[in-house]
Amino acid sequence: MSYETILVERKDSGVAIVRLNRPKVLNALNRQLMGELRDALEQLDNDEAVKVIVITGNERAFAAGADIKEMAPKGAIEMYLEDQFRTWDAIRRVRKPLIAAVSGYALGGGAELAMMCDIIIASDTAQFGQPEIKIGVIPGAGGTQWLPRLIGKSRAMELILTGRMFSAKEAYEWGLVSKIVPAEIYLEEALKMAEEIASMPPVAVQLAKEAINYAYQSFIM
Ligand code: DAK
């Protein structure tokens, strides 16, 4: 697997790491990156040696959202015909556990990508948010569905209608993330958790993930 916008690493422990790799633009999620991410996740999902997948960015940004510069000149019809939902949907269908290791910005589509994962580990510098309202759009990849379910309607409404960022501490207190750790060790901690899960019976792990996600079955994207 060789990509331009992500890096993929497989460990002997059964853990694979997918690193979003457009650091100059805070890992903005352009079409190429989303396509490569989808392809990598599908391949890792089909690889028997891989048990758990960790998705991460870098210390400054998990991902600052969809690539605004790429999106800006496009009209509604072009966006509709591109059908990006198909890509996001494919990520949502990955059967192996996905852990998001988040440091720095996780905004817009970046926050949605983290929420699409099964577990979020955050560094103490992580900042989440759905700032789309500020540019006249609404969260396009499920944020309006995920946030109310994960942190409650009133908070989700406030955050989506104001676009304000929220801290790792808030995200932890509201149950959005399962753990906050110092920035220096956020990836290490995520890998530790991934390795522990990778050592469990894999079919039971996948079934448990499926069963828990049943709670979100009415989720439509
Ligand atoms: N897109 C493109 N470039 C971005 C970017 C983004 N989202 N965020 C940052 N960058 C770029 C900046 O333009 C800058 O590039 P240069 O100007 O140096 O070339 C570089 O990254 C560094 O950013 P800053 O200089 O702005 O860094 P600061 O530390 O000052 O500020 C920031 C960091 C994260 C607060 C700021 O960059 C910012 O506000 N960024 C935009 C965040 C945002 O609005 N994100 C939401 C985007 S909308 C859909 C699925 C998903 C979506 C839509 C549809 N479908 C399935 C249909 C999702 C939509 C979104 O996510």
Image (cartoon, grey):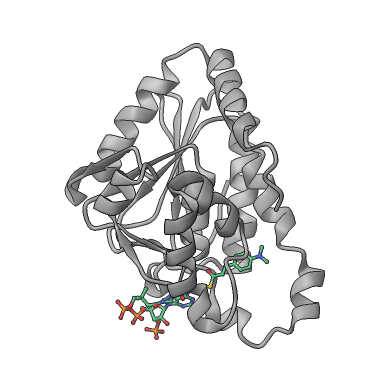
Above or below, comparing residue 186 to residue 211 in the picture: below
Residue 149 appears at what percent x and percent y? 52, 45
User: In this rendering, does residue 187 appear at all?
Assistant: yes
Regarding ligand 1, which quadrant of the image does it lie in?
bottom left
Above or below, comparing residue 4 to residue 192 in the picture: below
Residue 32 appears at what percent x and percent y? 62, 65
Residue 36 appears at what percent x and percent y? 61, 55
Q: Nearer the viewer, residue 213 or 187?
A: 213
Q: For the point 34% across and 28% down, which residue is it? A: 193
Above or below, comparing residue 82 to residue 152 in the picture: below
Quarter of the image for residue 20 reads bottom left
Above or below, comparing residue 100 to residue 111 in the picture: above
Residue 137 appears at what percent x and percent y? 59, 77
Q: Residue furthest bottom?
A: 73
Image position of 118 (left or right of 176): right
User: In this rendering, does residue 48 appear at all?
Assistant: no
Q: For the point 42% across and 74% down, which residue is it? A: 25
Q: For the point 61% across and 85% down, which residue is it? A: 72
Image position of 182 (left or right of 204): left
Q: Nearer the viewer, residue 3 or 212?
A: 212
